[in-house]
Image (cartoon, rainbow, N blue to C red):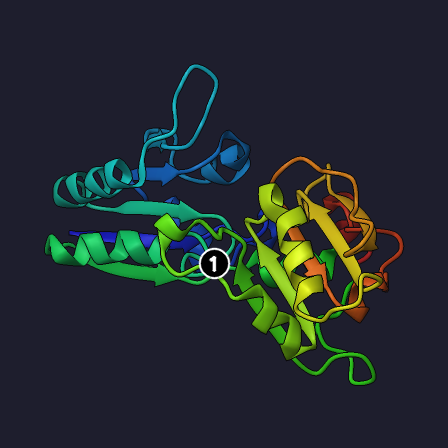
């Protein structure tokens, strides 16, 4: 009885690790969050059971407690269960909460790391998180500041840390976050980049400042705050699969 958490990376199936592909190829059941993961879920055997637990056409998203219970039930009844998580399973994806529930139920847990969007999205947008003359630190923050989900980030303190700030899952709160970062001492002219659907064909990147935020973009969105956010060192954008194969 083992549930394997597999990091799907930021979106492009080419960024999957060999271990992730092997786990999917051996899966009896795959549990995933969004229909947009279909290209990665397709790597599982044709007869594998596929369970989308996120919001989908004609289907409500399961509450976290329901997802935990489903994983426990599947883990007790299937030989090979893969829990596919975007990015890395243990970075701002609630994978840790699900793993805790499984362990409490006596179900073994294995983890296949993935490329976190905190790293993959800025790289795909040509933004180095660290550049000696601009930033030598990078801080990753879950932008969900709902007190019901635990202690919210201290944005004023984060503003004083300096360096680069990467904000995940903060799309609906970015105006409030920006205001608190300014209140904490960051200039309103501090660059910010919004990266939507990183590494996918529909990837979009908009840049602005804390005082003049980029226009809203479709989820998932990763925000980068700091001097490096103004850079674009890969001006041609994320390479397509055809381009990679054409220029190995």
Q: Nearer the viewer, residue 80 or 139?
A: 139
Q: Position of 13 compared to 210: left or right?
A: left
* Image position of 221 with respect to 129: above or below: above
Question: Which quarter of the rendering shows the C terminus?
Answer: bottom right
Residue drawn where x is 80% and y is 61% of the image:
188
Q: Nearer the viewer, residue 113 or 184?
A: 184
Callout 1 secondary element: loop
Residue drawn where x is 43% and y is 52% of the image:
93
Image quadrant in which you'd find residue 33: top left
Residue drawn where x is 68% and y is 64% of the image:
183
* Image position of 64 with respect to 248: above or below: above
Where does label 1 land, which residue? Answer: 88
- Rendered location of residue 116, percent (x, y): 54, 59
Image quadrant in which you'd find residue 225: bottom right
Q: Residue furthest front?
A: 183
Circle 1 Cα neighbour tier, 10 Å, few/some/many (<14 / 14–19 / ≥20): many
Image quadrant in which you'd find residue 118: bottom right
């Amino acid at each position: 009885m083992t549930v394997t958490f597999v990091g799907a990376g930021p979106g492009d199936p080419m960024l999957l690790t060999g271990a992730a592909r092997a786990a999917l190829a051996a899966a009896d059941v795959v549990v995933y969050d969004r229909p947009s993961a279909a290209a990665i879920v397709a790597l599982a055997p044709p007869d594998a059971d596929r369970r989308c637990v996120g919001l989908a056409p004609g289907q409500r998203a399961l509450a976290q407690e329901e997802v935990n219970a489903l994983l426990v039930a599947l883990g007790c009844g299937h030989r090979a269960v893969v829990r596919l998580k975007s990015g890395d399973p243990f970075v701002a994806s609630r994978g840790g909460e699900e793993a805790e529930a499984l362990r409490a139920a006596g179900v073994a847990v294995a983890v296949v790391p993935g490329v976190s969007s905190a790293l993959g999205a800025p790289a795909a947008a040509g933004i180095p998180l660290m550049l000696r003359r601009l930033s030598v630190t990078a801080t990753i923050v879950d932008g969900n500041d709902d007190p019901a989900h635990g202690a919210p980030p201290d944005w004023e303190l984060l503003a004083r840390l300096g360096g680069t700030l990467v904000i995940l899952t903060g799309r609906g709160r970015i105006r409030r976050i920006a205001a608190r970062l300014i209140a904490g001492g960051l200039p309103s002219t501090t660059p910010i980049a919004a990266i939507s659907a990183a590494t996918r064909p529909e990837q979009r990147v908009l840049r602005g400042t804390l005082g003049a935020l980029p226009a809203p973009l479709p989820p998932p969105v990763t925000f980068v705050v700091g001097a490096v956010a103004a850079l674009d060192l890969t001006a041609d954008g994320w390479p397509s699969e055809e381009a990679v194969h054409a220029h190995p």
